[in-house]
Amino acid sequence: MAATGEGGLRLVQHLVTALKEFRCLMEPDSRELCLELVARELDEVLPVRNHRVTNYFLVELAKECLDNERFMWALRGSLAILAPDAPAMTRLDCVMEQMTARPALPTDATERLRSLLEGLEVAQLTRLCQGAAGPLQEVPPVTGAWHAFETLSRMNARPDGLPPNLALVEYLAASARPLELADRLRSWADEQARELSLKSPLRSLRQQVGHAAPAEAIDAYLVIQLLPQDEPGRYELSSWHAYDPTGWYPIRGPVSNVTAATAERAVQDLVREATAEWEDAHCIHLEFVLSAEDLHLPVHMWRHELDSDFPTPLCDTYPVVVRSLERSQNRHWYRPWKKRWQTFSSQPERSRHLVVDGPDPDSPPSGDPGALLARLNADEHVVALVLNAPPGASQEGSRQASAAWRAGIPVVVWDRRHPRDPDFAHHLRQKATGDLARVREAVKELRVESQGLASAEREQHLGQHVMLVWDDPTRPVETQGRLAGPDEGVGSR
């Protein structure tokens, strides 16, 4: 990646300008700490000296970045720890993108390709783009084959050395019709691979893509977390999205601060961006990670298309479930949680549910959360619990929910009204046809049913008030590695 001549000097100047915006590089002590972090990441002695003159130090940093891409990325990671300043980091990323840009394909070659791709209709284009870009790069929304090629042209090479735009042509050729068009796309890719000395990795990719099973539509997940702040009614809103056929690999989105009044609109914007990106997904799931005091929030009734004449509840379009922030932050609750989920996944026919104050003789009574916890702990096949009061809005419901988290119950349901509809559990069981794995779909159906009623009837319908926790421990969002796929064996694709 060494840069020479006038272009290299310009990059040094651009990089030095970007680095000057990090205050931690201005003081000798803090920049010494930065160098120690870089050395720890690279596990080697650094050739960079901590000059007393700040500008000399920054020039030497920039020169080493131009000569050593590993050093550059380690420096960026250290700066992200010491000074997570979004504007400065954004400008640094822009310079780094210029520094790591790969040579562009010849203009005449791209024009020939454009004539082949414009107007080409491609099924599941987003997934093809992700496959071409590789697992470490996020692909923004694309609108067509040529737009996808242009977008991937701005990305770094894959681990096998192939430019993502060239890899994309190979993916497109595998699904292109008629076959004559597929042959022309492969011929174009072969020509570029010869020029770039990438014949071997292109040949390997061609075999891999050619022998792969036809892609099936998969589910996408948008996970939204509302973290309460010190001031009542204020939250830190975080989000993760996951749409990867190879496993659970959530990508974190930007973090923002919202209030109880602005959260709905912020969520609408996140949903709008996700649906634009995942237009070929089989189903888009919305999951809200809520604290114990916020479990009463009717997040399924939050609306999208707020500025239109017909704003509609999220639950009318998407499956909406809740996850427990409290449980996700208590590692000592994970073991029973994972164990019950495994039972639910591998032996759904043996899984059971309990209804607090239910009609059955063995239903646990309300009023004694300690006895409820003991009852849950005594039966490892119980994976679902129906509460008799809403948590977050009532002390009774909150205590029952807390017992469920401690016992590891992954599926928890309640009626937002208090007292609960006497036939709540019966209606839910009937809609799920007695299959616990169908509870998520049953709740979605009830909610959709309620939206089709007149306003007076709608307010009385169970679908307006049913809340569902569907908490899969194999799909954490605070993770940096791949884990088991989403909801395998429990009513999902």
Image (cartoon, helix red, strand yellow):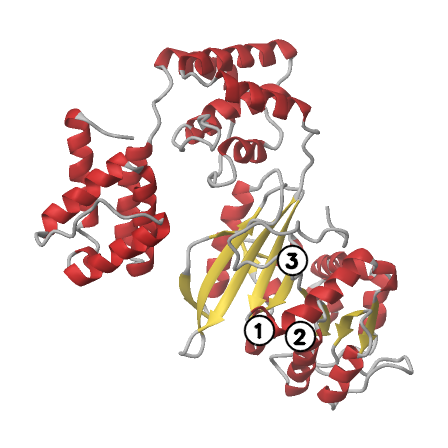
- Going by the numbered disc 1, the residue's amino acid type is Asn
Question: Residue 83's image quarter?
Answer: bottom left
Q: In this view, does 341 lie above or below 271?
A: below
Q: Seen in the image, is 410 located left or right of residue 34? A: right
SS type, badge 1: loop
206 or 93: nearer the eye? 206
Q: Mark 2 points at which residue?
A: 405
347 horizontally vs 478: left or right:
right
Residue at 52% from the left image edge and 30% from the top image edge: 132
The residue under label 1 is 330
Please indicate whether residue 318 sits to the left or right of residue 134 in the image: right
Q: Which of marks 2 and 3 is nearer the N terminus?
A: 2
Q: Is there any visible trace of residue 118 in the rendered image? A: no
Disc 3 target residue: 474
Furthest residue in direction right, as rendered? 361
| Proximity of marks 2 and 1: CB atoms separated by less than 8 Å | yes
In the picture, measured across the screen, residue 149 lies left or right of residue 380, that is left
Residue 1, position as x, y percentages in the image: 29, 30
N-term-proximal mark, 1 vs 3: 1
Tell me the distance, in whole angstroms, between the alpha carbons under discs 2 and 1: 10 Å
Amino acid on which disc 3 is placed: Thr
Q: Is residue 29 above or below residue 243?
A: below
